[in-house]
Image: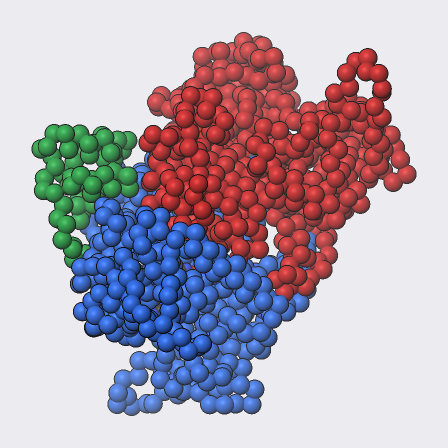
Chain colours: A red, B blue, C green
Amino acid sequence: MVVGDVTTGTDVLIVGAGPAGYVAAIRAGQLDLDVTLVEKDAYGGTCLNHGCIPSKALITATDVAHEAANAEEMGIHADPAIDLSGMVAWKDDVVDQLTSGVEKLCKANQVNLLEGTATFADENTVRVSHDGEGQGSETIEFEHAIVSTGSRPVEIPNFDFDDDPVLDSRQALSLTSVPDSLVVVGAGYIGMELASVFAKVDTDVTVIEMLESILPGYDDDLKRPVKQRATELGIEFEFGYTAAEWREADDGVRVVAEPADRTAGDDEEPDPLELEAEAVLVAVGREPVSDTLDLEAAGVETNDRGFIETDSRARTNVDHIFAAGDVAGEPMLAHKGSMEGQVATEVIAGEPAAIDYQAMPAVVFTDPEIATVGLTETEAKEAGFDPVVGQFPFRASGRALTTGDAEGFVSVVATESKGYLLGASIVGPEASELVAELGLAIELGATLEDVASTVHAHPTLSESVMEAAENALGRAIHTLNR
Amino acid sequence: MVVGDVTTGTDVLIVGAGPAGYVAAIRAGQLDLDVTLVEKDAYGGTCLNHGCIPSKALITATDVAHEAANAEEMGIHADPAIDLSGMVAWKDDVVDQLTSGVEKLCKANQVNLLEGTATFADENTVRVSHDGEGQGSETIEFEHAIVSTGSRPVEIPNFDFDDDPVLDSRQALSLTSVPDSLVVVGAGYIGMELASVFAKVDTDVTVIEMLESILPGYDDDLKRPVKQRATELGIEFEFGYTAAEWREADDGVRVVAEPADRTAGDDEEPDPLELEAEAVLVAVGREPVSDTLDLEAAGVETNDRGFIETDSRARTNVDHIFAAGDVAGEPMLAHKGSMEGQVATEVIAGEPAAIDYQAMPAVVFTDPEIATVGLTETEAKEAGFDPVVGQFPFRASGRALTTGDAEGFVSVVATESKGYLLGASIVGPEASELVAELGLAIELGATLEDVASTVHAHPTLSESVMEAAENALGRAIHTLNR
Amino acid sequence: PPRNRVFVPPRARRLARETGIDLSSLEGSGPGGRITPADVRAALDDGTAGVARESRSPETNPA
Ligand SMILES: Cc1cc2nc3c(=O)[nH]c(=O)nc-3n(C[C@H](O)[C@H](O)[C@H](O)COP(=O)(O)OP(=O)(O)OC[C@H]3O[C@@H](n4cnc5c(N)ncnc54)[C@H](O)[C@@H]3O)c2cc1C
Ligand SMILES: Cc1cc2nc3c(=O)[nH]c(=O)nc-3n(C[C@H](O)[C@H](O)[C@H](O)COP(=O)(O)OP(=O)(O)OC[C@H]3O[C@@H](n4cnc5c(N)ncnc54)[C@H](O)[C@@H]3O)c2cc1C
């Protein structure tokens, strides 16, 4: 790529190299499209640099230490010392391997990589400005564009991520010494994952949540084991409060939180809560990055939450401009973005691709993990099905018992009449991996009978998937059938 | 059940309460059959008491300690102390939970449980003798029988399991102090699993194997990472030797091993090998238990290896007598036995059941794990297919890197023309769980396209399954396609 | 195809056994050409594609 104030052309221009953008770009290369990928920050986007990967690295590492420290029952006596700067250096090394891998894969697939910030000039042109090294900017004309600019953490009033003791998830994932104490604002999946990471290295963690429970949107029976283990880890919860402001305190911050649902004119003014800690992590949600690239110049519309709306071909309101990933709406998950990115590219290449999945998995990497795919029982009823449900508790699983972690269950939802699988939810060990089989089952239109009569290896956790299906059919072996 | 010298009757008599027999019995209860289950030793059989479960418990526990001790790269500094007697007590507790669970499930399903040793009197009668408590014996008449008497370890000349320093797998799983050194005879899956367990608690392990490599029957590329990690763990290998005899030595045994393929009359007599160790574990295979229950009296035939041959309905040569599990032939795996036991029961109940699986999974719980299902590439060619293969290395998996263990790969085999999945093999983290999705895929008649276009959650190891399928189609994202 | 391997989900295999339909004689109408339970039922209604009822006597092929 030539830089400087010149105009070049490309068939497919992709803005943002997160899991939506770089996957779209590699696929474009495979389909022999002339493709240019613009990234202002780091290949791999939020996911590889500041999200999925670093969080999972720290979750796994702190687990290794925590498990060993708590395995006396197993005859193991250990008192691991944690060097958080070493752990974070290891995590950074994992990230580097993956991001440089992405760069190499892009190059190997003939993707033109361009570092810089893209803004739309009109509906066929972007300007890309290069910061640093004063390299100016350039203009690129495109036939098709994919907008995959991702999302950023929502800020709340009075909590500015530029202030030292106020952390967003990205900063929290790069701390180099273990804080003695931490206030986490928000009990969504990011808040809960990070709360567990720090609790496992002995930080005193308090979670403030506006609503009355953790992980809004998940069924109570899925949340229960997570809430319980969090409590066992020493995490304290203050439900029904919102963080209002913070002051400097002796060893960090004093966070002031107010009751969330104070009705105006309430007689008794409820007391605000004051919590002291070394730092405060704000994880109250993420919002699309759609306001910094002059989408209007291209005529691309966003909805009232700032998301770009797309059709089943990943197309925006402008025919030749597509959107994929977090910027294109919920669920804001990496694999959903990658899928949309691939669909966008394939549609551009003239293939009959469409966003037509039956079941989108979602995983919460708490302890224990939660994984869901397809419909819950309630959703199935709302959708007009007369669902049957089967469940299998991990405490009846030989494999779960041999790992010392037998909390949770596998639950499957299917149609009454023919037993077609509609959904599944799992809380427990390796939920994130077990959900894959059920996702495939749903996509293929498999029935309970199909899953139940497939031989599963013993002793594995995946047998619990089979037994949940058998339970729905009234013939589980290792649990009582209703 | 009335005991003493009386005659009672039962519709279905099952001999042996391992995973074949107890599963058959529970299923019989569910199908409202009058069923009696005779067990001479312990509910759950070899698998729960001395096999799958205890071995996996010790593998997991020693892993917890070993991982923590070797996580300096992750910033974790630990020096765990192992109390093997505590570990074994925990393992026994897991076993107790499961075996008492089996007993409860049998009772809840109206299975008549009878403790004692069964021998056939004729083709409709067994005698059950009760040892201990001098309770004599009783005679039971049956309409149908299922023989599920399992298997026992093969003994080799001069190595008697009754001698103190000579161990079978069962004894090795119950040691209460860590041996300084151990000779393992046999590099099959049981030998290799136990060699790793002891190497991880710092026993000096030497494996003697008659053949030239570990894990006979597995492809070289699957064995390679296992062999390498074993070597890193300090396990030494002596290939091409057979254990000939042992003598008492200062701190245990001196094992004499001779070159395996010494040709008679060879000019130069090759030197035997002498190895000293605290104990010697003999794990050279298992043989069916078919010679201790007077099968002849019932007219049931065994083949030259002692296995009872059965048809696709799990029937022996005698129409109303069935066999299931290890005694009914290879593969000697718990889930294969449970499946056969269920088929036997369902056939007895008049259901159209049959042993008609397309793919039987097999797992080796070494470090890393190996899991296979269906056909290998070579087997597919031999069967007349023109197979395509796709592979994905775990070092390209974000999730694998975040666990610190990215050795190995997922490999899939499919038909050339339509891409129907025929088989899969995996070596690497959680191979035992990942194989489940591929087993289901094969049973469902799924294609590469089906697996490739199912959304898999990020970041998970199961994405590697999807990418292997994509690779076979020439469109993997995170690895180069051939 | 080799060994007359059919790519059929378990539920259709079971239905075929129940009804005595020979799966290798069927054309699949499912995705990827898979044989579905509906194909088995259609063959049964047809009466043509079914071929012989599966024999009840022991088959020799072990697992
Ligand atoms: C702590 C944390 C943990 C998470 N864990 C998970 C998880 O386990 N699983 C999961 O599925 N999801 C997880 N997520 C969410 C996941 O990170 C996002 O869904 C995913 O990154 C979205 O991908 P994307 O490609 O749409 O956007 P992003 O990954 O955000 O990438 C967008 C890219 O666009 C670039 N960009 C933006 N504007 C411009 C411009 N004008 N010019 C050039 N470049 C631009 C940005 O620099 C960025 O690199 C997590 C998120 C966080 C914060
Ligand atoms: C160390 C080890 C690890 C293993 N790991 C695995 C693994 O991870 N996965 C796997 O799939 N397989 C594993 N196996 C193999 C697995 O244990 C067997 O395949 C399984 O136990 C076979 O089940 P079964 O019911 O046929 O027989 P068994 O489990 O052997 O049970 C047979 C039962 O019959 C009883 N019996 C015998 N004769 C009589 C009689 N005459 N009267 C009354 N009762 C009688 C016995 O006491 C016994 O309880 C392992 C085996 C070992 C030794």
- Residue B464 position in % (x across, y down): 45, 44
Quadrant where ligand 1 appears:
top right
- Residue B5 position in % (x across, y down): 32, 73
The answer to which quarter of the image holds residue B136 is bottom left
- Residue A44 position in % (x across, y down): 56, 35
Q: Residue at x 83, y 34 (%)?
A: A275
Instruction: Give the answer, above or below, for where B296 lies relative to A249.
Output: below
Q: Nearer the viewer, residue A140 or C37?
A: C37
| Residue B225 in sight | no
Location of the C terminus of chain A (image quadrant):
top left
Q: Residue at x 67, y 56 (%)?
A: A70
- Residue A47 position in % (x across, y down): 58, 35
| Residue A310 in sight | yes
Does residue B411 appear to the left or right of B142 in the view shown? right
Instruction: Give the answer, above or below, for where B16 lies relative to C57.
Output: below
Does residue B428 appear to the left or right of B313 in the view shown? right
Q: How many marks?
A: 0
Q: Nearer the viewer, residue A39 or A445?
A: A445
